[in-house]
Amino acid sequence: MDTAGAPAELFRNAAGKTLRLAVTFMIFLPASTSRSPTTTRRKMKTTILGSLVLTSTLLLTALAAAESTDYTYTITGNAVTVTGYRGPGGPANIPDAIDGLPVTRIADRAFFGCTTITSVSMPGTVTHVGDYAFYSCIRLASVDLPESLTHIGEGAFSRCTSLTDLKTGDGLANIGDWAFYGCSKLVTTGIGDGVTNIGFYAFYSCSDLYKITAGRGLNHIGWYAFRECPGLNSMYFEGNAPATDTGVFYDTTNATVYFRPGTKGWGKSFAGLPTVLWNPQIRSDGPLFGVRSNQFGFAITGTPDIPIVVEACIRLGRTPWEALQVCTLTNGFLYFSDPTWTNHHSRFYRIASP
């Protein structure tokens, strides 16, 4: 078929081969003039639009096929396990399906020692990341972990020395032993409510780790899980005090553990670190709540000297929270006022940990 002059999309697959997709547009004009120009234009517009949709569909299908060639894989039953990577490096966007089947697992050592990838995005079909799956991916700076993920295996991200932040979904139940050992640039970690166990040496030697937030489900922390994390400043627990093995914070001496009101099992210290009740409250029951000097404000009370950040958003669930003030609750009290409140039709406020 002659496709000369037809619209086409060009791209390269992982092997560098140029693929060409083309759709020829053929528009037949009526020989008779009895049909109105408006009707003719409408039919031409429909024909062209349909062809453009077809072109787009073909292109997306071909791109997905090219993306899947970046990986080796096995098929078990009706699901795909990614077993290796042979792509060009840079962002590794794991497809949600290969050969029409969902990608559900990343195999043990699948990306072991891959020094070319800089980020990883996993689809919402993946439930399992195997042992040492991304071990020593030294240029890997960010990982997008889906809500579907339930297991991170032993040493899965060990020695990923460029990884800077981590947030797990609520579906994750277990963080394996040595999972993030030696991630020296990891700064913040958010552990979802579904995680019940942090394995031994899980964050050992994460020297830049500064803040950890642990969800309500955590009930066990393994041996030396946060050993030699000299930069760790604070760990916030949403739930009850978890059981701990030996040396959880060995050689990690600068951190404070914060816990929430209504939770159980907390004493004056936790695994050798001091504990503080983190209980800031916006007071809407006093004279300081409301508009004063043309600024909306309110009082915040709580445990003396706890760190807080006042955040605001315009529409709940639809716009991001913006940090307005980061401070400590000196002597257990702070008056906050917002000079820009009149710039918004509505505004919501909350107190978060910094």
Image (cartoon, rainbow, N blue to C red):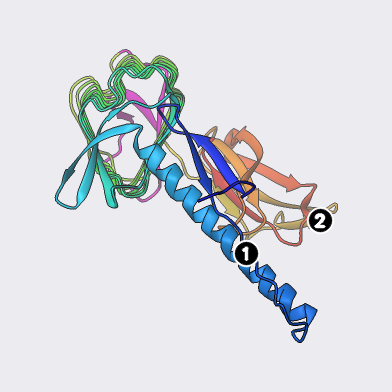
The amino acid type, in three-letter code, at marker 1 is Leu
Residue at (30% x, 49% y) in the render: 171
For label 2, the residue is: 342
Residue 287 relative to residue 72: left or right: right
Residue 339 relative to residue 135: left or right: right
29 in relation to 114, above or below: below
Q: Position of residue 25 (x, y in %)?
A: 61, 59
Residue at (62% x, 64% y) in the render: 49
Q: Where is residue 160 in the image (x, y as percent from the top left)?
A: 37, 19
Residue at (44% x, 33% y) in the render: 13
**Image label count:** 2
The amino acid type, in three-letter code, at marker 2 is Thr
Given the current orientation, which residue lies at the most extreme bottom position? 34
Which of the two residues, 214 or 297, is positioned nearer the viewer here? Answer: 214
Q: Earlier in the sequence, mark 2 or mark 1?
A: 1
Quadrant in which residue 152 is drawn: top left
Given the current orientation, which residue lies at the most extreme left position? 77
Q: Evaluate whether residue 229 shows in this view.
A: yes
For label 1, the residue is: 49
Q: Distance between the residues labelled 2 and 1?
A: 46 Å
> Was residue 166 drawn as part of the magenta stretch in this picture?
no
Specify start and end residues of the magenta stretch as a single range: 251-275
Circle 1 residues within 10 Å: few <14, some 14–19, many ≥20: few
Circle 2 residues within 10 Å: few <14, some 14–19, many ≥20: few
Label 2 SS: helix
Label 1 SS: helix
267 in relation to 36, above or below: above
Q: Evaluate whether residue 145 shows in this view.
A: no
